[in-house]
Amino acid sequence: MANYKMHLLVCGGTGCKASQADEILTNLRQIVEDKGLENEVQVIFTGCFGFCEKGPIVKVLPDNTFYTQVTPEDAREIVEEHIIKGRKVHRLLYEDPTTKEHISDSKHMGFYMKQIRVALRNCGFIDPENIDEYIARDGYGALGKCLTELDPLKTIDIIKQSGLRGRGGGGFPTGLKWEITHKVPGEQKYVVCNADEGDPGAFMDRSILEGDPHTIIEAMAICGYAIGANKGLVYIRAEYPLAIERLKIALDQARDYGLLGKDILGTGFDFEIEIRYGAGAFVCGEETALIHSMEGMRGEPTFKPPFPSVSGYLGKPTCVNNVETFANIPVIINQGAEWFTTIGTEKSRGTKVFALAGQINNVGLIEVPMGITLREVIYEIGGGIKDGKKFKAVQTGGPSGGCLTEKHLDTPIDFDNLLAAGSMMGSGGMIVMDEDSCMIAVSKFYLEFTVEESCGKCSPCRIGNKRLYEMLDEISQGKGTMETLDKLRNLSKVIKDTSLCGLGQTSPNPVLSTIENFWDEYVEHVMEKKCCAGQCKDLMQYFIIEEKCVGCTACVRVCPVNAIAGEKKIPHTIKQDLCIKCGACVEKCKFNAIITK
Amino acid sequence: MAKLKLSNDKVQQIKAICKSFNNEKGEVINVLHKVQGTLGYLPAEVQEVIAHELNISLAQVYGIVTFYSFFTMTPKGEHPISICTGTACYVRGAEKVLDEFKKQLNIKVGETTPDGKFSINCLRCVGVCGLAPVVYVGEKAYGKLSPEQVKDVIAEYN
C-alpha cells in the first residue's frame, strides 16, 4: 500500500454488492484512470464496514471520510471534488438523525463509537483478496509465533487463560475444547470450521469470511498445531458464493506463500485446508450433524457422548469451532491473554459480533464488548426504532432464542445473563421488533422454521414442534382457549427436556419466552379474539369510515360474498358475519375509506 | 436398473463429474452440488446415475437430495424468483411481498409458471438484512421491496 497517496475503499460485502457496488468500483477506477491518477490513488474492494443500512459505502483514506449510500453516478464527483480538489462531497456524508449534522469521520458516528473491533478488525480495512494486506496488519504473525516460540500446550494455555468461549451459540470454553482434543490419543485429528450460518438474520460469519478470510486460515492452522491435527475442513453454506470465492482465493495465496501445506515456515509442521459445502439444513450447525453432513450423509445429529473431540469426522478426534471464535484466536496470541481479559465481563471475555436487523434505524453488523446493555445497542448504536415507533421486543439467538422486552433493556449482554432472561446468545442475530409485531405471529414464524428444519430423527422434535405450530395457528385464528395456552406451555417443556439435540432442546424458547413476557397478548388472543398489533389476519375486522365514503358502490360490486351493503351516494357498511377478510374492497376503494382494526 | 430417459450426453456429463471426485462416496454432496449447477435440477434419473457411479444405494442419494433444501428435483423457471423469508425480512414485510408475487404470477411457492418463465421459492436469510425485504430474480437483488413494486419487477422480465 506504500506508494499510493490516497485509497478509495469500496465495500465489497454481499449487501453492498447487491446495491451496485461493482459498478461503483468500476466507475471509480475508470475515472481515476482517465485523470491519470492510477499510480497515486488506489481503488479496492474491502470487506463489510458493518453499516449495511447506509450502503453502499465508500471510504477515503488517509482522511477517513465515510461516504454513505453512494451510487455509480457519484463516482465522478468523489474523484473530481474530493480527490482532485480536496473538497468533501457533503451530500454523501452521514447525517446524524438527531443533530442533522454531517459527520465525515466514522469514528464520530453513534453507530461506531461504542464498538470495539476484534474479530472484525480487518473487515473494511484490507483487500480480502490480497494476502500482503493481511500480512501488513500482523497477519500470520500469530501462527509464526506459535510454531517457533510456543509449544502446543502453551498455545492452548493462552487460549484457556483468555477465557474465550465459543461464539457459535453454546459458549463452551474454547481453550478447554482444544485441550480435550489435544489429550485424546490419535494419529489423525481434524480441525473443523463451522461456517454453516443457518440462523436467519445472522450474517457475521459470512462477513468475516468475505472481509478477512486469511484470519480463519491462520487460526485453523494454529488450532491444528495446538491439538495435533494437520487437516482442516471448512463447512460453509452454499448460499454464500462470495465468501466461498474469497476463501478459495485466500487458500491459494496462503499455499503460494508457504503458510499452508507442507513444512510451514520451515518448522516441519504440515497443515492443509479443504472446503465442504452445506446444502441448506439448519440442523447442520449442530456439531454431530455437521460432521455427518461432511461425511456425505444426511445431516442428522447423534447422541453425545462421544463428543467430536473424541470421535468426530470419520471417527477421529475433531475440534469444531465457529468462524467468529477462530477470528479471535490470532489477536489473542498476538496481544496476549491478559489483554483479552480486559474486555468484556468476568465470565464472558472479549467482544461479540451481532447482526442488528429488523425495525431498527441502523441495520448492520456490530462488534461490542460483552456486558454492554441492550439499550446501548438498540438506541445508541442502532439509532432507535424505525419511523419513531415504540420498541416492543428484541429477539436474540434466532430460532433457539427468545424475545426480550423493555424490562431487559438494561441487562448487560453476556452468555449467562441472556440464558437467565430466557433467551440465549446464539450466533448473534439480534432482531428488533416494534409495536406492529404480534408475538404470537413471531412465535409461529419461528416454529414454522423449526418444523421445516427438524431432521425428523427424534419424535419430540418432529411431532412436538408440529403440534406447537398448530396450537399457535389456532390461537392466531381466534380458536384458542385458555386450555390451549396450558398445553402450549406443557408441551414446550416436554420438547425441551426430551429432544436429542440442541435444535429440539431450544426450539420452544421463542414460545416460552413470549408466553413469559407477553402473557397478556396471548390472553387477549384467546379471550377477546383480538390482535392488538393487527398482524393476525383472522382476528382483523374491516370497517368503512363514514366520513370518507362517498357511496360509489365500487366495494359493493367487488365483494365476493356480498358482505357490503349500501346504495349509491350513501355511506356503505360491512356485515362482519359475512366478511371473509379477503381485502378486495380495500384495494378497490379510491378514497381510503376502508380500514382494518 | 430403470430405463434412462436422459440423453447420452448428459449421462456422460454426470459420469465425468463423479469421476472428478474419484467416484468417492463421501463426496456425494459435492457431486450433487456440481451436477445441479450443471443441469439445473436433480430428477430421479440423474440420481440413479450418481448412485451407480459412486456405488451407493439410490435410497441414500434420494435421502440426501430430499434432506437438504438446496437440492431440487423439479426444474426452476427461466427467471427463478427467490424471496428471503429470514427473520429480518419477515419483520419488514416479506410475507406481503411474497403474497403479491404469488398473486401476480398465479403460482404457489415451489411452482413454476406454465410458460416456464418464472418460479417462486423462499430462502432462509441470505444475510443482506440491510436491504430487507430482499428478493432475488436470478442473480439480481432487489432490496427494500414493497408489494406495490412487485408488478414492475416482473415486468422487467416480460
Image (cartoon, coloured by chain):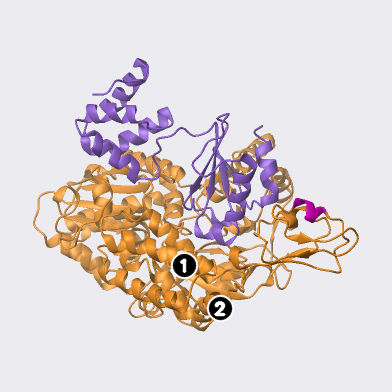
Q: Amino acid at mark 1?
A: Leu
Q: Quarter of the image holding residue A589?
A: bottom right
Mark 1 Cα shell of 10 Å, populated few (<14), some (14-19), many (≥20): many
Numbered disc 2: secondary structure: helix
What percent of the width, then of the height, locates residue A377?
Answer: 53, 73
Which chain appears orange?
A
**SS at mark 1 in the image:** helix
| Image spot of residue A106 (x, y percent) | 60, 63
> Going by the picture, which residue comes out furthest to the right?
A569
Q: Is residue A457 above or below residue A513?
A: above
Compared to residue B16, the image places residue A414 above or below, namely: below
- Figure label count: 2
**Do the residues indicated by labels 2 and 1 lie within the same chain of the protein?**
yes
Q: Which residues are magenta?
A: A554-558
Q: Quadrant of residue A166?
A: bottom left
Quarter of the image where one finds residue A343? bottom left
Letter of the chain shown purple in the rendering: B
- The answer to whether residue A288 is left or right of residue A571 is left
- Which residue does the image show at 25% across and 68% down from the upper left? A498
Q: Is residue B27 located in the magenta-colored stretch of the structure?
A: no
Camera-nearest residue between B150 and A597: A597
Residue B106: where, in percent of width, then height? 60, 41
The mark found on residue A472 in the picture is 1
Q: CA distance from mark 2 to mark 1?
A: 14 Å
First along the sequence among labels 2 and 1? 1
Badge 2 amino acid: Glu
Tell me: residue A114, above or below residue A66: below
Q: In this rendering, does residue A151 appear at all?
A: no
> Closest to the observer: A222 or B34?
B34
